[in-house]
Image (cartoon, rainbow, N blue to C red):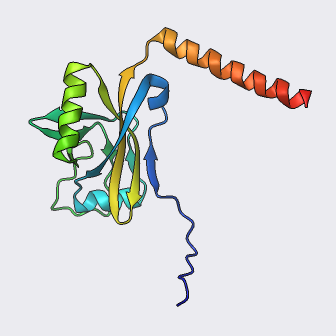
Amino acid sequence: MAKKNSSKSTSNTIALNKKARHEYFLHDKFEAGVELQGWEVKSIRAGKVNISETYIHLKNGEAFLLGSQIQPLNSASTHVICDPLRYRKLLLSRRELDRLVGATERDGYSLIATAMYWKKCWVKLEFHLGKGKKMHDKREDGKNKDWSREKERLMKHKV
């Protein structure tokens, strides 16, 4: 049989949180499904989503996505009230939820969303356990990045 010739070369990534690596020390990575309504899926396909100020809140043994903005399309239904900032439930296993509850309550970690992407026909959210950086940590990271760039320049000219 012949393979399907897919002319689309689109990325599966919907949205990224680029500030997360600058603002937090990121440790463990998790993936969760997102419970969405119909109008939200259409808006996500159109690219009207922002997760830059997004975090995960654990409540009553469930995980919820807070701060994500999914703007409704202009052609959205008028009989459905579209709330762009509503809480969205995350679909995780009980073992993962128990681990996250222990880490956030006991160890003082936060749960920060870093990426939203398509996996087959499902919207998935990638998030990390992280601790906030202080100002001196951010300065130190900047110095390390500058020094690594300078090393690369020196090695490039030396060879």
Is 5 in front, or is 45? 5
Residue 44 image position (x, y, % from top left)? 37, 56
How many numbered circles are shown?
0
The residue sitting at 19% across, 42% down in the picture is 95
Q: Residue most toward the bottom?
A: 1
Q: Determine whether 121 is above or below 23 in the image.
A: below
Residue 21 sits above or below residue 115 on the image: above
Q: Which percent across, then down, holds residue 29?
A: 38, 39
Q: Nearer the viewer, residue 36 or 74?
A: 36
Q: Position of residue 100 (x, y in %)?
A: 23, 33
- Where on the picture, by quarter, is residue 75? bottom left
Residue 74: tell me if it is visible: no
Left or right of residue 111: residue 48: right
Residue 83 location (% of width, % of height): 22, 47
Q: Quadrant of residue 45?
A: bottom left
Where 134 falls versus 30 (above or below)? above
Q: What's the residue at 31%, 41% (across, down)?
A: 68
Quadrant where the C terminus sits is: top right
Please report the residue visible at 19 percent of the width from the left and 22 percent of the height from the top: 105
The image quadrant that residue 80 belongs to is bottom left
Seen in the image, is 155 located left or right of residue 119?
right
Extreme residue toward the top, this view: 136
Residue shown at the point (55%, 88%) measured from the top left: 2
